[in-house]
Image (cartoon, rainbow, N blue to C red):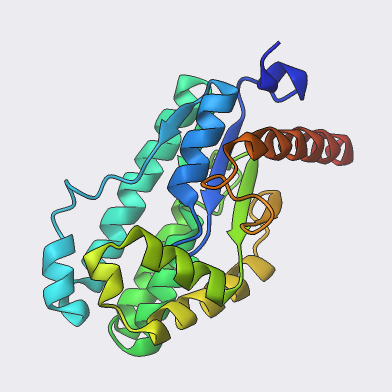
Amino acid sequence: MNLREKYGIPNSAVITIAGTVGVGKSTMTTALANALNFRTSFEKVDTNPYLDKFYDDFEKWSFHLQVYFLAERFKEQKRIFEYGGGFIQDRSIYEDTGIFAKMHYEKGTMSPVDYETYKNLFDAMVMTPYFPHPDLLIYLEGSMDSILERIQERGRPMEQQTPVSYWEEMHTRYKNWIDSFNACPVLRLDINDYDLMKDPECVEQIVERIGYFLDKTATLRK
């Protein structure tokens, strides 16, 4: 018996992984997909036509970038459900509006008119009964020290050059976002309790928690 059957997780389940940079979303996505024999859905960065332009001029391109992300994630979400589920998804569509677009607006790198247009578009596309929301959002959280340690360990040049104040701001924004998030059920996991890099075997404990959580959520809905 595989882990999915052992813990009663439907083979049509769609599980999204969320959390700030450095918490291990990609590692968690891959580990859960392997454990459950699910497919993965990763963010496509290489084909993004706005990313380089955005880094050269935030104010000019932030709206374009966010609309592009929204369209791509929306198409991917539809594809996942049309396929019949059975996916682990790295990063959610909800973070784009709840964190990144909001941050650009508050910092003045997206105009009030553009932000309002983006929010209206997001609400019309996503915040409706017709949009296929995930069965579960797993939110990875940890202390600022733990996250900074992980960012240092993986050694990506762009991340190494980013001021610590930026990571601190993202940490706070993510915490505020998840505390008020209610678009789908949320399972919160502390990265210090479930460190897949140091203890790959703990994936079974995570799967067990997912199975219990999904069962409890289904019972409450009845």
Q: Position of residue 208 (x, y in %)?
A: 76, 34
Q: Residue at x 53, y 54 (%)?
A: 18
Q: Quadrant of residue 36?
A: top right
- Position of residue 5 relative to residue 67, above or below, is above
- Location of the N terminus by quadrant is top right
Q: Position of residue 221 (x, y in %)?
A: 84, 39
Q: Position of residue 30 (x, y in %)?
A: 46, 35
Is 159 displayed left or right of 216 in the figure? Answer: left
21 or 78, which is in the foreground? 21
102 or 140, which is in the foreground? 140
Q: Residue at x 22, y 67 (%)?
A: 157
Residue 90 at least partly seen: no
Is 81 displayed left or right of 116 in the figure? Answer: right
Furthest residue toward top = 1
Q: Quadrant of residue 217?
A: top right
- Location of the C terminus by quadrant is top right
- Position of residue 149 relative to residue 13, above or below, is below
Q: How many marks?
A: 0
Q: Position of residue 206 (x, y in %)?
A: 69, 40
Q: Residue at x 54, y 44 (%)?
A: 16
Is 200 displayed left or right of 170 in the figure? Answer: right
Furthest residue toward front = 198
Q: Residue at x 28, y 84 (%)?
A: 109
- Position of residue 54 relative to residue 112, above or below, is above
Q: Quadrant of residue 117?
A: bottom left
Residue 187 at least partly seen: yes
